[in-house]
Amino acid sequence: MQPIQDSFGRHHNYLRISLTDACNFRCFYCMPNEDVSCTPNAQLMQPDEILMIAKQFVSMGVDKIRLTGGEPLVRKEAREIIDELSKLPVELCLTSNGALIHLFQDCLLQSSIRSINISLDTLEEDKFQVLTKRTHFKQVLDNIEWLLENDFSVKVNAVLIKGMNDNEINDFIELTRYKKLHIRFIEFMPFTDNSWQDDRLVSQQQILNTAQEKYDVIKLQDEQNATAKKYKAVGCEGTFAIISTMTNPFCDSCNRIRLTADGKIKNCLFSKTETDLLAALRGNLNIEPFIRASIKSKKEKLGGQLFDNFSTEDFEKLENRSMISIGG
Ligand code: SAM
Ligand code: SF4
């Protein structure tokens, strides 16, 4: 079968499936300020529907699937979904806030998942509470330890926000000295009502400058289609990387397709339009043409909504979901 290609010749083989738009954390940069209501279960893709859709994508050349959310592990059928997707011939990965991993130890060990991204924006307990409005700091650290002890590849995602956690860049890198951890600093991105301001962005260059003040930093070879630019501080076991969506976007090599928990394809993190795959599936239609049409209509860069000189854009006019209902 033909691979999934857009009109710029980009080949899409990586599917990110959101299992839910609910979350047990309240990270301010990820969700609107006011109370958020989550989608009722009946409107979410059900486990059998997720499997059918995933199989269709696999038949079209998708060979990597990441489960995300909201928090994927709060979905009540998370175990069943992980079990079923583990049978597919794909690299299966998970992005989680890490708070519930201890309840999924058996499930994860039995699954095909070998690589897990854990979001952790601070190494200070008080600040963790401010950022997430939750108190699970120690549990998240313990769960990261357990994952490392059980040979999972662990990437720690930290969204950097000026005045909040940019003073911790080198503390995060120091974590990699004796642990085979991979830290990924993420530039703060604008979404609906998420308090984004350009002066709160910590840029790729600022992150590198800070790292170089303390460490000899070497550039590592990046993986194909990688969004993260990888580095190593000399003498450290682990690595660090920078995801520079804002100051140095990587749209040229984008291979990602996003599926929201209510079954809509987003062909870009910043796309305005969505394609309702779940409605097509429930209407007994062949979903293949919907997938192809969605990716064909993908814009060249940043959903056609943002431009390289991001600081001059009017972010109030961005038409998008908030990150919690896209899945990152
Ligand atoms: N709950 C899981 C977690 O936190 O890892 C998965 C979903 S979360 C939406 C996926 C990723 O998006 C996380 O690494 C989070 O830090 C990132 N994220 C959320 N809002 C963001 C923003 N405004 N800018 C940059 N990254 C963001
Ligand atoms: Fe929840 Fe993850 Fe968003 Fe934080 S970043 S609110 S943990 S979905």
Image (tube, rainbow, N blue to C red):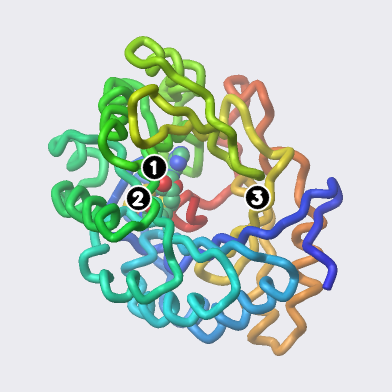
Q: CA distance from mark 1 to mark 2?
A: 6 Å
Q: Exactly how many numbered labels are in the figure?
A: 3
From the top left corner, tell me how far across and down residue 94 is, in percent. Answer: 43, 60
Cβ–Cβ under 8 Å for marks 3 and 1: no
Front residue (pair 81, 149): 149
From the top left corner, tell me how far across and down residue 51 is, in percent. Answer: 56, 81
Q: Which residue position holds label 2?
A: 118
From the top left corner, tell me how far across and down residue 52 is, in percent. Answer: 61, 83
Q: Amino acid at mark 1?
A: Asn
Label 3 vs label 2, nearer the camera: 2
Mark with earlier residue (3, 2) = 2
Q: Which residue position holds label 1?
A: 157
- Using residue 127 as the reference point, say whether residue 20 is left or right of it: right
Marker disc for residue 268: 3
Front residue (pair 113, 75): 113
- Using residue 120 as the reference point, say whether residue 293 is left or right of it: right
Q: CA distance from mark 3 to mark 2?
A: 22 Å
Instruction: Tell me what residue is drawn at x 57 percent, y 77 percent.
Output: 88
